[in-house]
Image (tube, rainbow, N blue to C red):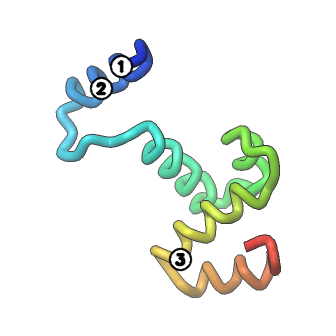
Amino acid sequence: MTTPGGRIWKQAVKEADLPFHYTPYQVRHTHASWLIDKGVDIEKVRHRLGHGDLTTTTRSAIKNLDQEDSTAKNVMSDLLGELV
């Protein structure tokens, strides 16, 4: 059974005629990545995503940075130490 929100999401994706079926999770992750990439403070990103603590947000950020640039990952790892 599809929820009303699920039906709305599927219809929106269909109408957008995108080359790939994006999930809400992927859009949320991309949103956070773009904010971090543009220099938004990670604590503000954490609050915006509704994460209870910074560790969850940090893990997401490091995962994305790792895929893009190992230098950025290393800097974040040095700054945040054991959180990542």
Q: Quadrant of the N terminus?
A: top left
**Horizontal side of residue 41 vs 13, given as left or right:** right
Residue that appears at 54% across and 85% down: 70
| Spatial CA span between label 3 and label 2 | 30 Å
Residue type, label 1: Thr
**Res 9 quadrant in image:** top left
Q: Position of residue 57 (x, y in %)?
A: 69, 56
- Tag shown at residue 83: none
Q: Earlier in the sequence, mark 3 or mark 1?
A: 1
Q: What SS does tag 2 mark? A: helix
Q: Quadrant of the C terminus?
A: bottom right
- Mark 2: give few (<14), some (14-19) or many (20+) Cα within 10 Å: some
**Res 39 quadrant in image:** bottom right
| Spatial CA span between label 3 and label 1 | 35 Å
Q: Position of residue 54 (x, y in %)?
A: 79, 56
Residue that appears at 61% across and 61% down: 60
Residue with the mark numbered 2: 10
- Tag shown at residue 2: 1
**Horizontal side of residue 67 vs 7, given as left or right:** right
- Tag shown at residue 66: 3
Q: Position of residue 79 (x, y in %)?
A: 80, 79
Residue type, label 2: Lys
Q: What SS does tag 3 mark? A: helix
Which residue reaches farthest top? 4
Q: Are marks 2 and 1 in contact (CB under 8 Å)?
A: yes
**Res 8 quadrant in image:** top left
Residue type, label 3: Asp
Q: What SS does tag 1 mark? A: loop
Residue that appears at 53% across and 54% down: 34
